[in-house]
């Protein structure tokens, strides 16, 4: 099975940028469907992006990419807003997966992103 570790979170002012990384170990990430999710305090975990789709709230601002040689998936986040504040998780699935958390079997521990106004 694959293990996932997110990094790159932090505190940033509104309008700023961050790039999150999701490093995989155990198995090659290229054979998995991968997604990014986020969970704000008091809210349910919500979909952010897969390699082929984005949540409406992040379209045009966030970009997902992968480097198979580094076994890593990235989430470039630009023009950040206070509403983007959340713990961000990457997830992987051996089967077809899209925007529902329950479709993914493997999860990282999350990385905190805080956007100040």
Image (spheres, helix red, strand yellow):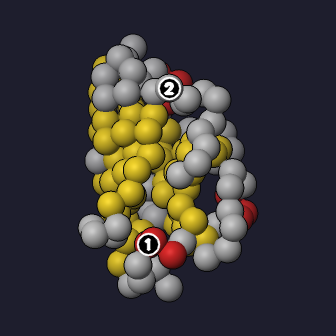
* Residue tagged 2: 60
Identify the residue at horizontal 54%, vertical 30% (top origin): 58
Image location (x, y in percent) of residue 117: 39, 14
**How many residues crowd around disc 1 within 10 Å: few (fewer than 14), some, or many (20 or more)?**
many
Side (left or right) of 34 relative to 20: right
Q: Position of residue 33 (x, y in %)?
A: 57, 65
Point out the tag, 2 or 1, that comes first from the N-terminus: 1
Could you tell me if the residues under marks 2 and 1 are in contact, i.e. CB atoms within 8 Å? no
Place of residue 36 in the rendered image (x, y in percent of width and height, measured from the top left) = 52, 51
Above or below residue 52? Residue 1 is below
Residue annotated with mark 1: 29
Report the residue at 44% width, 39% height from top.
63
Please state if 69 lies on the left or on the right of 39 as rendered.
Answer: left
Q: Could you tell me if residue 67 is visible in this image?
A: yes
Whether residue 6 is visible here, answered yes or no, is: no
Distance, label 2 to label 1, CA atoms, is: 25 Å
Q: Would you identify the image quadrant in which residue 78 lies?
A: top left
Q: Residue furthest top?
A: 117
Callout 2: SS: loop
Q: Residue 31 versus residue 21: which sits nearer the camera? A: 31
Q: Looking at this view, is 83 or 55 the one in front?
A: 55
Pointer 2: residues within 10 angstroms few (<14), some, or many (20+)? few
């Amino acid at each position: 099975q694959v293990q996932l570790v997110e990094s790159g979170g932090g505190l940033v002012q509104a309008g700023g940028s961050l790039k999150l990384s999701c490093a995989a170990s155990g198995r090659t990430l290229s054979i998995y469907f991968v997604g990014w999710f986020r969970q704000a305090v008091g809210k349910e975990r919500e979909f952010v992006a897969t390699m082929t789709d984005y949540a409406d709230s992040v379209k045009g601002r966030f970009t997902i990419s992968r480097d198979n040689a580094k076994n890593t998936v990235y989430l470039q986040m630009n023009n950040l807003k206070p509403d983007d504040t959340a713990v961000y998780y990457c997830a992987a699935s051996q089967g077809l997966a899209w925007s529902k958390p329950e479709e993914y079997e493997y999860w990282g521990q999350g990385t905190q992103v805080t956007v100040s106004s």
